[in-house]
Image: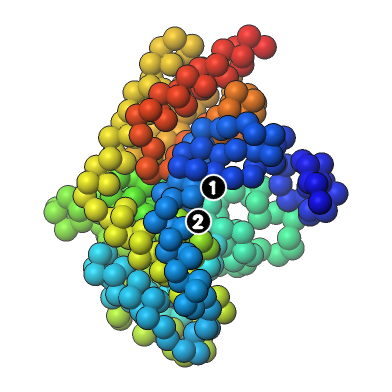
Amino acid sequence: MTVTRQTFDQVMIPCYVPQDMVLERGEGCYLYDTEGKRYVDLSAGIAVNCLGHNHPAVVKTISEQAQRLIHVSNIFVNDKTLTFAQELTQLTGFDKVFFNNSGAEANEAALKLARRVACDNYGEDKNEIISFAHSFHGRTLFSVSVGGQPKYSSGFGPAIGGITHLEFNNIKALEETISDKTCAVILEPIQGEGGILPVDPEFLVRVRQLCDQYHALLIFDEVQTGVGRTGTFYAFEQFKDLNGGKGVRPDILSSAKGLAAGIPIGAILTTNEIAQHFKPGTHGSTFGGNPLACAVGSLVLHTVGSPEFLAHVSAMGDLIRSKLSALNDKYHCFQEIRGKGLLIGAQMSPEYQDQAGKLQKLCSKHGLLVLVASANVLRLTPPLIIGETEVNEAMTLLEQAIQELIAQ
């Protein structure tokens, strides 16, 4: 059976507007379509394919585990899930893990857990969740209501109640809003879908202090910033010198995307004290923590978690940002280049306002796959294994796309 881009319009529910190619295979930092055209991939499945495409160790792990055990449900325990959970707690310093299948599910679990803790300890009136404008936490009705982008949440009937949205990095607004009714504050260390917007360290310290003062849980959504993406395994590790050297740790951390290098998995990490409020029957996941995903997760943890690998991520991020700055010196198409590690955003200059999507399509035309984060930010989330050769090739293709944008 032959399929084309038009097949999507015929058989798929139109939640997406995919680009004009049908991808067929991948290798490392490259993807190939059914016409044989090669693309340099700076999207990595939206920060999912941390070890690139068709990585030999990933393929080997999947093959070996598929021959042993793929799924058994959480009525039983299995060796791979327990091993991965133990490794994650040892790496992060958290006590307990709950596995599911995606970032949205991880945030759903984190938010439910926060409300259950508040209800158990203080009563049902302590249920307010504070989130921030431009945030993104998933597409379930709960997580999309908590997210700070109305374009994703409107049109689905009444939103989940008890949610307040504030301006990101605005200390005064938070101080005036948080109260004894607040059960949780949720934020991304770097807002991904909102435009690669980093949290202000002073704001973050104050969030932690206010959460402690009002007995509210602090949730870090590290779905996109985690698993080495910003140069440490989780971004919260970079805050260890804040708050008088005490650091800023979340009470609950959500993780997904690159956690199993392309195999669906999500997780929340938390403390013993908080975890005990999820008693048997209060939450669950049919596929969550299946042995196949967890076997790959262990591989990812041991690979990405090494100091040498994380140093490589930071170095390649610095290289890409320097290359983007050099391009901008020539073409003046970006207003700001921001991000950490290999989570990079280039905000379009006023002259090219809201043309990130157009530049993205031109990049595809020239053989480069990139993302956008809002209509005005070009987003780069390459495989973490990317090297200098692939970076140079990608920047050459990006320059060709920029030249065509300017000429239009």
Q: Amino acid at mark 1?
A: Gly
Q: Is residue 241 left or right of residue 6?
A: left
- Percent position (x, y) of residue 60? 43, 61
Q: Amino acid at mark 2?
A: Gly
Image vertical order of residue 202 relative to residue 124, above or below: above
Query: Which is nearer the eye, 230 or 351?
Result: 230
Image vertical order of residue 285 relative to residue 21, above or below: below
The C terminus: image quadrant: top right
Q: Which residue is depicted at the point 50% across and 74% down? A: 67
- Percent position (x, y) of residue 349? 52, 20
Residues packed near mark 2 inside 10 Å, few (<14), some (14 to 19) or many (20 plus): many
Label 1 belongs to which residue? 45
- Residue 186 visible (yes or no): no
Residue 271: name its quadrant. Answer: bottom left
Helix or strand or loop: what does disc 2 sit on?
A: loop
- Residue 338 visible (yes or no): yes
- Percent position (x, y) of residue 220? 39, 59
Q: Which residue is depicted at the point 44% across and 16% down? A: 328
Label 2 belongs to which residue? 262
Distance from the alpha carbon under mark 1 to that under mark 2 = 8 Å
